[in-house]
Amino acid sequence: MLIKRCVSGAATSLQRTYATSGVRAPNAPGFRTALRMALAACGVASLIVTAHSCAARQPPIRALDVSGVWEGFTRVTSCSPVTLYSSLRCAAVNPIRLTLNHHDTVVTGTYRCTTGNVICRNLTEEGTLVASSVSGNWFSFRIAMPEDLSSCFFNGRFSEMSGNGDYSCYQGGRLVEVGVWKLTRVP
């Protein structure tokens, strides 16, 4: 129905445009090319509308409940002077603990870092999960570190008992650390 209305409207509009030239529309130079372009535009518009309406009908992906205590580690993966605040953190591995509370689409919680093969970045051992985005088993968290006013962004996937992904930390608008994380749910 949508395509039929679009094609009919395009043909009528083109005929009106060419009628002002005094030449019968189907015989006018460029009429057939203009009509083909209008038909192609109708097809594309129809596909976009159909795809959007199909996507709109899909039920939302139910998020995995990540409430609970998770323990694991972070590991610095980039030792570039551009992304690493201190060369002492190159290949640093630190045990971490996340305590998460998941309500609907919002995840809140706390972060705790302890000394691993080196001390935690800037001696920052605690943080608060201040923003989150959840879709199915994909999670994105922003953890604010009040001790040094930095923020770390954790992105990754969770299953019932484990999670892993990557992280990046910023301080004063500057990227100061990049790495990976891995967690296991504490029973």
Image (cartoon, rainbow, N blue to C red):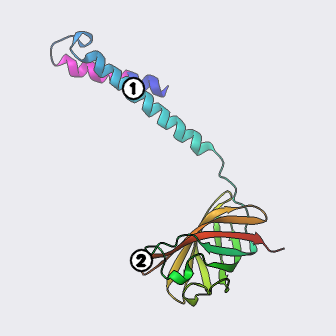
**Rendered residue at 38%/29% (across/down):** 41
Q: Is residue 27 left or right of residue 6?
A: left
The residue carrying mark 2 is 173
| Residue sticking out furthest to the right | 187
Q: What is the crowding at mark 2: few (fewer than 14 residues within 10 Å), some, or many (at least 20)? A: few
| Residue sticking out furthest to the left | 21
**Rendered residue at 57%/70% (across/down):** 77
> Is residue 183 or residue 66 the one in the foreground?
183
Q: What is the crowding at mark 1: few (fewer than 14 residues within 10 Å), some, or many (at least 20)? A: few
Residue 43 % position (x, y): 44, 27
- Residue 152 position by quadrant: bottom right
Q: Is residue 183 left or right of residue 145?
A: right
Q: Amino acid at mark 1?
A: Ala
Answer yes or no: is residue 83 visible. Answer: yes
Residue 105 % position (x, y): 64, 64
Q: Is residue 161 left or right of residue 144?
A: right
User: What main secondary structure does the magenta stretch of the protein show?
Assistant: helix
Q: Is residue 129 magenta?
A: no
Per the rendered image, the range of residues in magenta is 8-20
- Residue 163 position by quadrant: bottom right
Q: Amino acid at mark 2?
A: Gly
Answer yes or no: is residue 132 visible. Answer: no
Q: Is residue 15 above or below residue 171?
A: above
Residue 34 % position (x, y): 29, 22
SS assignment at label 1:
helix
**Rendered residue at 39%/22% (across/down):** 7
Q: Is residue 81 above or below residue 146?
A: above
| Front position among marks 1 and 2 | 2
The residue carrying mark 1 is 40
Which mark is first along the chain, 2 or 1? 1
Q: CA distance from mark 1 to mark 2?
A: 46 Å
